[in-house]
Image (cartoon, helix red, strand yellow):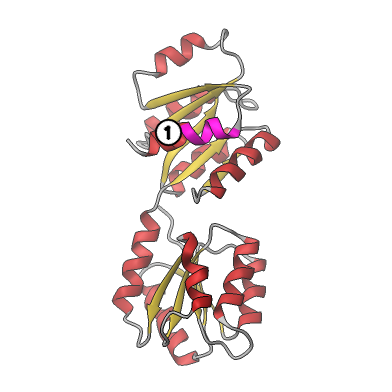
Amino acid sequence: MSQSNILIIDDNRDMADGLGMILEDEGYQVTLAYNGRDGIGIFNAGHFDVALVDFKLPDMNGVAVLRQLHQKDPQVRVIMITGYHVEQLLAEAIDDGTVEVLRKPLEIGSVIKILNRIQKENIILIVDDDPDAANRVTAQLTDQGIKTLLAGNAREAVAGVISSPVEVLVLDLRLPVTYGLEVYLELGQRGHTVKTLIVTGYADDESGTVDSLRSTAVTGCLFKPFRPEQMLRVVKQIMAH
């Protein structure tokens, strides 16, 4: 499993630098910013799984930073660092469950504990060469707070499962060049068997394949066309078991 990319936004350079070094020793990839505007710019130019944001920054408050980070990536997890009681502004911002709050003086053990928990949170990997269909489903899952990755071909699918803590694989059986079943079998050979939801638009042609997979880790099947909310319901059922 790859370690998370972390962005620290804090104007206390000594604390930010020290925390960054400790987290790098833990295996995380860390980038630093010392004010809100720089932090937002760095975030928009890269990819980060977690942002640690000081609530009181010299140029803007942490909630304003948080809102701009979520505009770029609604799924990014934010750890808000504050020496104050939770103000109403911050209380409203943490309602969606993507924000944690840690109080100063900061305990490194608490930071690492949260990061380790986030690291273990599983995601949904959707494998489909139809970007419009995949994006519609992704939007539905994201709105429910479910972290989602996309893969458009077999190579991206295998790499995604190997590098990320994928809980459910949503696999279209008909992919460019490679049949979806081959992706499933290759993952099994590599020791990466995950719960799998098969998606196909060819119910009659592939009924035998679907039936043969039901006895393995495949836990569901959807036949196209289906509505995004149908996918959401099935995915939630799979995740609950």
Taking the spot 58% from the left edge, 58% from the top edge, the residue there is 74
Q: What residue type is labelled 1?
A: Leu
**Does residue 6 appear in this view?**
no
Q: Does the magenta stretch include residue 93?
A: no
Q: Position of residue 117 (x, y in %)?
A: 34, 60
**Does residue 110 appear in this view?**
yes
Q: Position of residue 2 (x, y in %)?
A: 43, 56
List the single residue furthest toward the front: 88
Dot 1 alpha-carbon crowd within 10 angstroms: few under 14, some 14 to 19, many 20 or more: some
Taking the spot 47% from the left edge, 13% from the top edge, the residue there is 209
Vertical position of residue 8 compared to residue 203: above or below? below
Q: Where is residue 25 in the image (x, y as percent from the top left)?
A: 36, 74
Q: Is residue 229 magenta?
A: yes
Give the magenta-colored segment's residue range. 228-233
For label 1, the SS is helix
Q: Where is residue 153 in the image (x, y as percent from the top left)?
A: 61, 34
The residue wearing badge 1 is: 187
Report the front residue among 56 and 163: 56
Report the front residue among 3 and 141: 141
The count of marks equals 1
Vertical position of residue 113 compared to residue 145: above or below? below
Q: Quadrant of residue 241?
A: top left
Taking the spot 49% from the left edge, 60% from the top edge, the residue there is 96
Q: Quadrant of residue 73?
A: bottom right
Q: In which quarter of the image is residue 27?
A: bottom left
Kindly report the secondary structure that dominates the magenta region of the rendered protein.
helix
List the single residue furthest toward the right: 132
Report the front residue among 218 and 54: 54
